[in-house]
Image (tube, grey):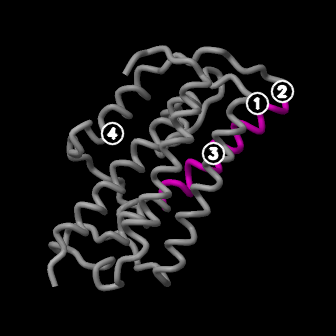
């Protein structure tokens, strides 16, 4: 992952990746039976539905944070930059969670307690999880579009750690997508290993 990338290329790739995530969800996960969606290979493992719930939980943080940061930058009359220079932390974190080219998931990571579906009550319905997932991705596509109007090097987005760790906007977009790809792949792997 190079340090510098054309802003337009980053956002074009982000849009493409987001559309692919939506397509994969609709074709490979949404049609599954309820029994398959909630099946877990072990009590401490996640189900397919919990993978989606986890993405919803994290997106409840990142989407409003990105929207607010972009709106603030637009209001100040900020101009977009032709190039985006990836930050060290953002680049390392994205590389650490992004699925490898061979389709494997790298490096086991620990999930914050508040974002681990095993520590939370189950969702009210599968449909509610699906609806929220799709709405977040529609919102995220709008964020990608609005990011064309600002300097992604200067706009900062709070991570799940709050103000302790902030991403550059471009890093935040790439991190969220890598996180999505990781857990969608996890969900697909669960569907393959499902046993009645």
Compared to residue 116, the image places residue 160 above or below, namely: above
Vertical placement of residue 94 versus 35, above or below: above
Which of the 4 image quarters holds residue 156?
top right
Q: Position of residue 86 (x, y in %)?
A: 48, 20
Secondary structure mainly formed by the magenta segment? helix
| Cβ atoms at labels 2 and 4 below 8 Å apart | no
Q: Disc 1 or 4, which lies upstream in sequence?
A: 1
Quickly name the residue at label 1.
Answer: 73
For label 2, the SS is loop
* Crowdedness near tag 4: few (<14), some (14–19) or many (≥20) residues, C-alpha within 10 Å: many
Q: Is residue 40 left or right of residue 57?
A: left
The residue sitting at 33% across, 77% down in the picture is 37
Task: Tell me the distance, in whole angstroms, between the alpha carbons under discs 1 and 3.
Answer: 12 Å
- The secondary structure type at the circle numbered 3 is helix
Q: Residue at x 40, y 46 (%)?
A: 179
Question: Residue drawn 50% across and 57% down?
Answer: 22
62 magenta-colored: yes
Q: Earlier in the sequence, mark 2 or mark 4?
A: 2
Mark 2 in CB contact with mark 3 (< 8 angstroms): no
Give me the residue at 31% from left, 79% from top: 38
Identify the residue under disc 3: 65
Position of the N terminus, as image quadrant, is top left
Q: Which residue is mark 2?
A: 76
Please check the rendered image and state whether residue 90 is part of the magenta-colored stretch, yes or no: no
Q: Position of residue 63 (x, y in %)?
A: 60, 50
């Amino acid at each position: 992952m190079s340090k510098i990338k054309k802003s337009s290329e980053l956002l074009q790739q982000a849009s493409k990746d987001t559309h692919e995530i939506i397509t994969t969800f609709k074709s490979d996960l949404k049609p599954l039976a309820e029994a398959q969606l909630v099946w877990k290979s072990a009590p401490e493992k996640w189900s397919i539905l919990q993978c989606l719930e986890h993405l919803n939980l994290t997106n409840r943080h990142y989407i409003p944070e990105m929207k607010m940061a972009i709106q603030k930058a637009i209001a100040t009359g900020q101009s977009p930059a032709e190039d985006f220079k990836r930050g060290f932390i953002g680049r390392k974190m994205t590389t650490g969670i992004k699925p490898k080219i061979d389709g494997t998931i790298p490096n086991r990571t620990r999930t914050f307690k508040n974002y681990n579906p095993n520590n939370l009550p189950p969702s009210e319905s599968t449909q509610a999880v699906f609806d929220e997932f799709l709405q977040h991705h529609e919102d995220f596509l709008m964020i990608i579009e609005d990011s064309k109007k600002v300097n992604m090097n200067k706009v900062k987005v709070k991570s799940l750690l709050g103000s302790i760790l902030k991403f550059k906007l471009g890093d935040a977009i790439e991190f969220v997508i890598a996180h999505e790809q990781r857990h969608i792949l996890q969900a697909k792997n669960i569907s393959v290993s499902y046993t009645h």
